[in-house]
Amino acid sequence: MDTRTLGTTGPAVSALGLGLMGMSDLYGAADEAESIATIHAALDAGVTLLDTGDFYGMGHNELLLREALRGRNREDAVISVKFGALRDADGGWNGIDVRPAAIKNFLAYTLRRLGTDHVDIYRPARLSPEVPVEDVVGTLAELVDAGYVRHIGLSEVGAETLRRAHAVHPIADLQIEYSLISRTLEAGILPVARELGVGITAYGVLSRGLISGHWTANRQTAGTDFRAHLPRFTGENLDRNLALVDALRAIAEARGVTVAQIAIAWVLSRGGDIVPLIGARRRDRLSEALGAAELALTGADLAAIEAAVPAGAAAGTRYDEAQMAHLDSERA
């Protein structure tokens, strides 16, 4: 597995990271034993970047990761943790809390659940209009100085917010959705990140499975699978988006690879400062995704991909209206 450095101040990590959210939450039921086996397989394949959140399964995801790392060398993993989202006992959502005291509280619980004395990258999942980003990053800088956090990251923030944050303390990376059908960061956010030396960890590279080549129009989703409520997965939007996948499939078949591998390789091709996060929950899906790291796209491939799935081609927004309102990255 090749490595890439997250920005000018961040850690060296594997060129592909593993996102763990679906092993605990939001995508329906998951098999815990298979989840742990998938994490083990990723580590054995050279994947070092493991991304979690303290609110994924209300702490379950961190406990799962702790179990998966049991008996392993802690320094072989670069653990990235998001915080700030508030949950209730029924799995509902109760807003965002990024006040300084709350940040320190969240981290204390995270360290205990993970069974570690530090988090490699710590980031707010979203920001709150009541708390300036300068106060959030200032608090994180204190935790860096105390040794509990090694690097500061952000998630889904716009270019101006990124500048303000970076002026307080160097930001290692910005975690943001980036895929063939989610490219809004290219116009303003990505150039500023590169100017500041901030890396990109790209989640949703398969658009939550929509452009994986495995999603079908008649697929039934469980009640706990939030994709059933996302605009791109419903009605005419789904039909239009799956037509894009069919166009991508023709390119993949010509190369003798899968749709998922083409889609992941495209994100990898966008720059050495971008690290895609794979959301695999099973070893077979992980193996497929890792194959993208060995796929070198030619100029002709990239031109064909661009023609098949041009920027802005997706039907529907990536979240519903209420969730889109929380995205600083989507504000003009």
Image (cartoon, grey):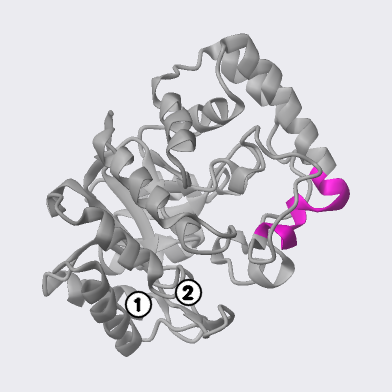
State which quadrant residue 246 falls in: top right
At mark 1, the secondary structure is helix
The CA span between labels 1 and 2 is: 9 Å
Instruction: Kindly identify the amino acid type of the residue bearing the numbered disc 2.
Output: Leu
Q: Which mark is residue 127?
A: 2
Is residue 240 shown left or right of residue 327?
right
* x and y percentages locating residue 29 in the rendered image: 56, 59
Q: Is residue 237 above or below residue 141?
A: above
Q: Residue at x 66, y 41 (%)?
A: 181
Residue placed farthest to the bottom in the image? 101
Mark 1 is surrounded, within 10 Å at the Cα level, by few (under 14), some (14 to 19) or many (20 or more) other residues, namely many
Q: Is residue 180 above or below residue 165?
A: above
Q: Residue at x 32, y 51 (%)?
A: 50
In magenta segment, residue 231: yes
Q: Is residue 326 above or below residue 89?
A: above
Instruction: Count the labels in the image.
Output: 2
Q: Residue at x 70, y 30 (%)?
A: 309
Q: Are marks 1 and 2 in contact (CB under 8 Å)?
A: yes
State which quadrant residue 41 falls in: top left
Q: Nearer the viewer, residue 92 or 248?
A: 92
Q: Report if residue 7 is visible in the image.
A: no
Q: Report if residue 231 is visible in the image.
A: yes
* x and y percentages locating residue 74 in the rendered image: 14, 54
Q: Main secondary structure of the magenta part?
A: helix
* Quarter placement of the N terminus: top left
The boundaries of the magenta stretch are: 227-238
Residue placed farthest to the right in the image? 236
Q: Residue at x 19, y 68 (%)?
A: 115
Q: Which mark is residue 136?
A: 1
